[in-house]
Image (cartoon, rainbow, N blue to C red):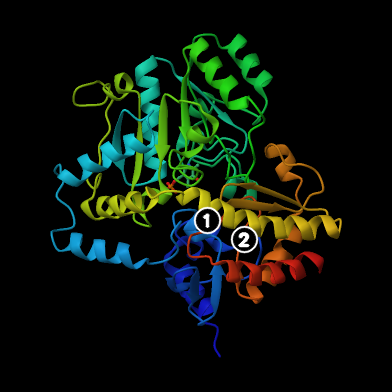
């Protein structure tokens, strides 16, 4: 049988740089040709060769209900009939903004945008406009989309390709961004002493997922939140992955920290392009046209994406949603932990809620430096063994994988057998 993935890639490379619309899709970290996906249903995807995979990548986070859930398809079909874009306000977006506030009490006001990158870019501009300060602090290996100011020691694609800085970003702009290691409070204080009253914001993923999943040390998030208050620095939580994933109210609910601004994306759009930035009303009111900070978007609050989001929030709002999902994930994680410890394998499984990363390193992974010690070749072997047996994990080690409601216990137990083999060989 002709390999359709290979054929498509060849054609794609003629018209699309590297044949892909986002770098990590090119499988450079694990080698081999990327899968071209034909369709998805429930926990599965099928590639163009007709091979089926149990999907742990979940479109990099959005698909907490698996692929193409019936309820969502129905909701979209209905919404579509009324039009696909108006460039004018609709009742749906007002309802959505109000409901986002119910899930995230810290988001007193919000604006809807079309991608996580756009949400973060807007939040950073707003923080600068509100504080009148220029500099920002981010975390080493923290990823916030391809925002110029934040492609400085960014994880994921950056970490994988060894190009933490991108060409095309002026040094003068990058010089306004400081980076500190995750879980290192002292590093923050050191910058504060040097840069008194010039830091607009500290932006971070409260539970980093783009250097692989890494957990905040006890008290770390509370401490930095107090520090931000002290310094007049706005705290921006990038919950594009963790929002709606770890709990209804994201990591800020789990850790009891109230950021000034929050960015959401991925899950909320149900697989359609929708993201959110929002927070304190006094800050959000600085946006145009009332305020001096400009921000706009032709497709912002797109009615199809909004109808998808309203369906997502309906489903997530049920009792014990996250409790049940996390309990199922926990059983699966226990299985992997068991294999690692029984065989004394040099591997670490980091997990939070229903997301996880398997690092091939014997030492704890607590920040970007310790994540980077993981063995990329070993991961590539693991990835291909699993793919050969019908499991699709992220084609890079420095990413989060996800369990969805569509992953049944039976499927997860079967997956564990493949993972055991992959780990032991
Ligand atoms: C995916 C991601 C982004 C960027 O979102 P896009 O929709 O890809 O632009 C920003 N921040 C975090 C934490 C992400 O995981």
Badge 1: residue crowd in 10 Å (few <14, some 14–19, many ≥20): some
Find residue 201 and report its horizontal and vertical position in percent: 47, 22
The numbered dot on residue 58 is none
Residue 128, by quadrant, is top left
Q: Is residue 118 above or below residue 42?
A: above
Q: Residue at x 61, y 70 (%)?
A: 391
Find residue 329 and report its horizontal and vertical position in percent: 59, 56
Residue 154, by quadrant, is top right
Q: Residue at x 19, y 59 (%)?
A: 79
Find residue 215 and report its horizontal and vertical position in percent: 64, 38
**Residue 77 placement, left or right of 36:** left
The numbered dot on residue 28 is 2
Q: Residue at x 45, y 70 (%)?
A: 12
Q: Quadrant of the C terminus?
A: bottom right
Find residue 261 and report its horizontal and vertical position in percent: 40, 28
Residue annotated with mark 1: 23
Structural distance between the alpha carbons of marks 1 and 2: 8 Å
Sequence-earlier tag: 1 or 2: 1
Q: Is residue 381 visible?
A: yes
**Residue 340 placement, left or right of 99:** right
Between 135 and 235, the residue placed more toward the observer is 235
Q: Is residue 10 above or below residue 202?
A: below
Q: Quadrant of the N terminus?
A: bottom right
């Amino acid at each position: 049988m002709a390999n359709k993935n290979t054929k498509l890639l060849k054609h794609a490379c003629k018209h699309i740089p590297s044949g892909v619309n986002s770098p990590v899709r090119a499988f450079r970290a694990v080698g081999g040709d990327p899968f071209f996906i034909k369709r998805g249903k429930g926990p599965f995807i099928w590639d163009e060769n007709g091979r089926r995979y149990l999907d742990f990548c979940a479109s990099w986070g959005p698909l907490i209900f698996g692929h193409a859930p019936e309820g969502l398809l129905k909701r979209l079909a209905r919404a579509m009939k009324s039009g696909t874009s108006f460039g004018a306000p609709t009742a749906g977006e007002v309802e959505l903004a109000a409901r986002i506030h119910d899930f995230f009490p810290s988001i007193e006001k919000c604006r809807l945008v079309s991608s996580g990158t756009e949400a973060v870019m807007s939040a950073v501009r707003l923080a600068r406009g509100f504080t009148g300060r220029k500099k920002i602090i981010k975390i080493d290996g923290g990823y916030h989309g391809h925002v110029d100011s934040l492609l400085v020691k960014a994880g994921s694609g950056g970490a994988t390709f060894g190009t933490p800085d991108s060409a095309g970003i002026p040094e003068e702009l990058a010089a306004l961004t400081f980076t500190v290691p995750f879980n290192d409070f002292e590093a923050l204080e050191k910058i504060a002493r040097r840069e008194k009253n010039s830091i607009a914001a500290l932006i971070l993923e409260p539970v980093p997922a783009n250097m692989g999943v890494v957990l905040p040390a006890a008290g770390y998030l509370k401490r930095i939140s107090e520090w931000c208050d002290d310094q007049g620095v706005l705290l921006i939580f990038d919950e594009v992955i963790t929002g709606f994933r770890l709990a209804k109210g994201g990591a800020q609910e789990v850790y009891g920290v109230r950021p000034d601004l929050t960015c959401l994306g991925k899950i909320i759009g149900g697989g359609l392009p929708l993201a959110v930035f929002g927070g304190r009303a006094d800050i959000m009111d600085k946006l145009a046209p009332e305020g001096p900070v400009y921000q706009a978007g032709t497709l912002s609050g797109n009615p199809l994406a909004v109808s998808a989001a309203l369906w997502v929030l309906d489903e997530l709002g049920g009792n014990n949603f996250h409790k049940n999902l996390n309990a199922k994930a926990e059983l699966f994680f226990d299985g992997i932990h068991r294999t690692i410890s029984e065989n004394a394998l040099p591997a670490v499984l980091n997990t939070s809620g229903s997301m996880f990363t398997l690092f091939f390193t014997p030492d704890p992974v607590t920040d970007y430096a310790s994540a980077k010690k993981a063995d990329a070749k070993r991961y590539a072997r693991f990835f291909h063994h699993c793919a050969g047996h019908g499991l699709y994990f992220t084609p890079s080690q420095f990413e989060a994988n996800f369990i969805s409601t569509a992953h049944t216990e039976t499927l997860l137990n079967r997956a564990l057998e493949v993972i055991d083999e992959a780990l032991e060989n």
